[in-house]
Amino acid sequence: MRRILIVDDAATVRMYHRGILESAGYLVEEAWNGIEALEKALEAPFDLYIVDINMPKLDGYGFLRELRQQQIAQQPAVMVSTEAAAGDERMAYQSGANSYLVKPVVQSQLLSHVRLLLGEANQ
Amino acid sequence: MSLVKHKVVQLAVPDKPQPERSCSEPASSLKNADAAGRRQAAREIAQFPDAAVTLVSHLKCERNAAVREVILTTLVRLNDRSAVSGLADCLRSEDAALRNEVIGTFKRLGDEVVPVLRSLLADPDPDVRIFVVNILDSELHPEVESWLIDVIERDTHVNVCATAVDLLCEVGTEAAIDPLVRLKARFQFEPYIQFAADLALKRIREV
């Protein structure tokens, strides 16, 4: 079963994304900031990361930059943010994101990005 | 033995023009010194009247996290109107790390921030309004819940309302029930709002 880590400081958002992903058959874990996410990822890399931008201690950009510096952690990441500014999307990709979604995310949108990045788009 | 008290002699100080205090020297160090020098300059600059403006101006371009931390701590100590409004301006920065540091700093400030935050809830930029809701918590001000209710009743941006509902899940009381129901009706085609509002309603009714 594919493992996905949701990284977001808002508990409600984590619960919402978890519900969508678990109902699609994924195994989901959560982290509430970049530091906690990095610890979990380095302990056992996930198949995919869903990452918020604005979080305390270590934001989403910082988390992805750190993650990409680790040779063992090149798995895809979806960056999710409340912001639709072009600068944020550009920075997301520069930090190592593979796709970018603006909140509020709808189920079909999230799952299509996840499946595409996991190579399951035709399944 | 009795103590002999010496009379304190007041020396006459001649009227000599004092050099005008200016923060130009530490301000220059903020731009030119190494990181240790910039941290030192950020601390020294606090004693000058225009400190907040200078510090905020430098904060926006400072890349070293340790220097930024000293600048933010100094601004917290200053805690004046210039410091607060300067920090508020940083919420518009494209630098996510700076925005998050500023959000953390706002949480350390006292009553001085309350009127600024209140006015920023009406800022034209929805991202700023989202950051302000992130700063709010029940310990900041006793009326935080009523501000959040006001947000979900009036704000037209879905993500501002969503962020307010996230917080109402934690601090909401019975006063939030009807506004949450109205929010669900207003954003009836937004699944996240339906989910978050239902969660908030469930938690409020459980308490």
Image: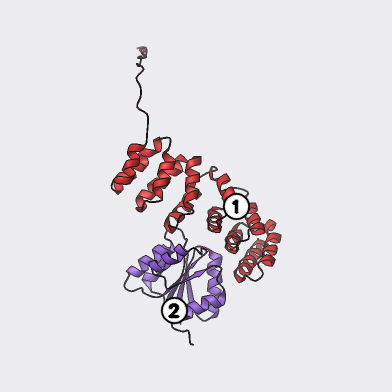
At label 1, counting other C-alpha atoms closer than 10 Å, the crowd grade (few under 14, some 14-19, many 20 or more) is some
Identify the hue of chain A. Answer: purple
> Residue A117 bears which disc, if any?
2
Our reading of the magenta stretch's main secondary structure is loop
The N terminus of chain B - image quarter? top left
Q: Of helix, strand and loop, which one carries label 1?
A: loop
Give the quadrant of residue A38: bottom left
Mark 1 falls within which chain? B
| Picture residue at 41% right of the left edge, 69% below the top | A93
Disc 2 residue type (three-letter): Leu
> Residue A12 bears which disc, if any?
none
Q: Is residue B42 located in the magenta-colored stretch of the structure?
A: no
- Position of residue A112 relative to residue B176, above or below, is below
Residue B80 percent coordinates (x, y): 49, 39
For the residue pair A52 and B203, the one nearer the viewer reads as A52
Q: Is residue A7 located in the magenta-colored stretch of the structure?
A: yes
| Picture residue at 63% right of the left edge, 49% below the top | B143
Which chain is red in the rendering?
Answer: B
- Position of residue B35 relative to residue B176, above or below, is above
> Residue B122 bears which disc, if any?
1
Q: Of helix, strand and loop, which one carries label 2?
A: helix
Q: Which residues are magenta?
A: A6-10
Gap between marks 1 and 2 measured at Cα: 39 Å
Residue B68 percent coordinates (x, y): 38, 50
Residue B96 percent coordinates (x, y): 44, 58
The C terminus of chain B - image quarter? bottom right
For the residue pair A85 and B172, the one nearer the viewer reads as A85
Give the quadrant of residue B23: top left
